[in-house]
Image: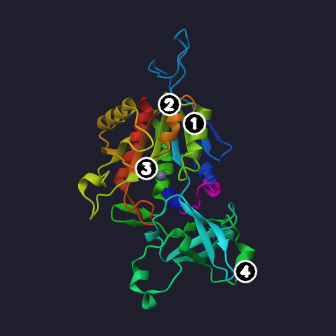
Amino acid sequence: MKLLKELVTTAGTSGREHRMRKLLRAKAKGLFDSIEEDALGSLLCVRKPTKKAKGKSKGKTKADGKSARPTRIMLAAHMDQIGFMIRYIDEKGFARINPVGGFDTRNLFARHVLVCPDVNDPKKDLPGVLNPGGKPIHIATDADRNKVPTIDEFVIDFGLSCDEVKKRVKIGDMVVLRAEPIEVGETIVSQCLDNRVACWIALRAVEQLAKTGHDCEIHCVFTVQEEVGLRGAMTSAFAIQPDIGIAIDTTLCVDTPGVTGDAAVTKQGDGAALTVMDSASIADIDVLEDFERVAVKHKIKHQRSILPRGGTDAGALQRAGVGCRSFTLSCPTRYIHTVTEMVHRGDLNACRDVLAAYLAQV
Ligand SMILES: [Zn+2]
C-alpha cells in the first residue's frame, strides 16, 4: 500500500495538480513508451502494443481491410481531489474559502487543513484549522446548534497575526484537508481515495500487463479538473480520439446503516463495480459485457452498479470529438467526499485485475 499512501498524501486540487503530476510522472516512468503533458495539465502516457495483432483488432480499418490499426484505448483516471481555494483574508488574519468540488459542510467541522501557497513546493505549506464562525456549544442557542452552516461561514485560523498571514497566504492558494491514511480491518481509510485509487489501479494494471502483453494501444491519461466538470478528460480525449474510453473512478458504497439496500449502489467486498449508467453517461453495452466476461473467466469478483446522480470522466470521453464507446470501472467507496473514505482491499485488487485482464485480450 506504499504507492497508494504516497498518492493520497500528495496535495492536488482541481487546477492545482502540479505535485500529483510530478509524482505520477515518476511512477509511470518505465511503464510507458511516452509521457506528455497537455495544455490543461493532464498527463498522457502511451503504451504501444506488445503483441502482434491476431486479426481481432477493432480499430479503424483502411479501405483495403488489411492495415487495421490497433484498437486505441484511453484510460482516464482523474488525479485532482476536492478542496478549496483561499477566497478572502480579513483584518484579523482569518481566511474564508471557496470550494473546489462538492463538499458536505456537515463533514467540515473542526478540521485540520493545509494551505499550499506554492503549488510546487510542499515546504511552504502552512497548517491551519477550519471551523464555522459562531459560538461554541457552551454559549450557543438551540437555533445556532441546529443550523448547518454554509461553506461561506467557515474560516481558517492560522494562529498567526494578520500581517504574517498576508505575507504567506494569498487569494487563490490551494487548501486541502489534513488526515493521515490508516488501515482499518480489511480496508484502507483516507481522504481523496476519490480518485487516487484510480491512479493506483491504472498504474498497477499496466504493470501487470507487462507480463501478459497486449494488442491494443493504451493511452493512460491522468486527467485534471474532473471534480469541477470533467474538463481534462474532454480535451485529452479530443486529442487522442480513442476507440474505447474507460474512466476509472470511485463510486458510492452506501451499504451502511440508515440506508435501504436498494439505495446502496454497491456493496463493499463484492468486487469491482462495472457501472451500467450514471447521470453523465450510459456504458457501451458491448464493453460492459466484455468486462463481465473477462471477470467471469478469470474468477474476479465483480458487481454491476447504477449511480442515479453524479458522473465520471466517461461522460466527457464519450462525447469528445466524434465520440467513442465508453465505460466506467468503479471502486466501491464508503463515506465518499469525506476524510474517512473507505475502500476494501479485495475490491481494489479486483479493479486492478479485471482492468489488466480486459486490456490483455481486447
Ligand atoms: Zn472521482
Crowd around label 4: few <14 · some 14–19 · many ≥20 (10 Å): few
Q: Nearer the viewer, mark 4 or mark 3?
A: 3
Mark yes or no: residue 216 visible.
yes
Residue under pointer 2: 324
Range of magenta residues: 9-20
Q: Alpha-carbon distance for marks 1 and 3?
A: 20 Å
Residue 45 visible to an observer of this rendering: no
- Residue positioned 51% across, 49% down in the render: 199
Q: Residue at x 55, y 52 (%)?
A: 228
Quadrant that contains the C terminus: top left
Mark 1 touches mark 2? (CB < 8 Å): yes
Residue with the mark numbered 3: 310
Q: Earlier in the sequence, mark 1 or mark 2?
A: 1
Task: Name the element at disc 2.
Answer: loop
In the rendered image, which residue does mark 1 sit on? 237
Whether residue 260 is in magenta: the answer is no
Question: How far apart are the two marked residues, 1 and 2, measured between alpha carbons?
Answer: 9 Å
Q: x, y (%) of residue 168? A: 72, 74
Is ligand 1 closer than 8 angstroms to the Cβ of mark 4?
no
Q: Is residue 107 left or right of residue 255?
A: right
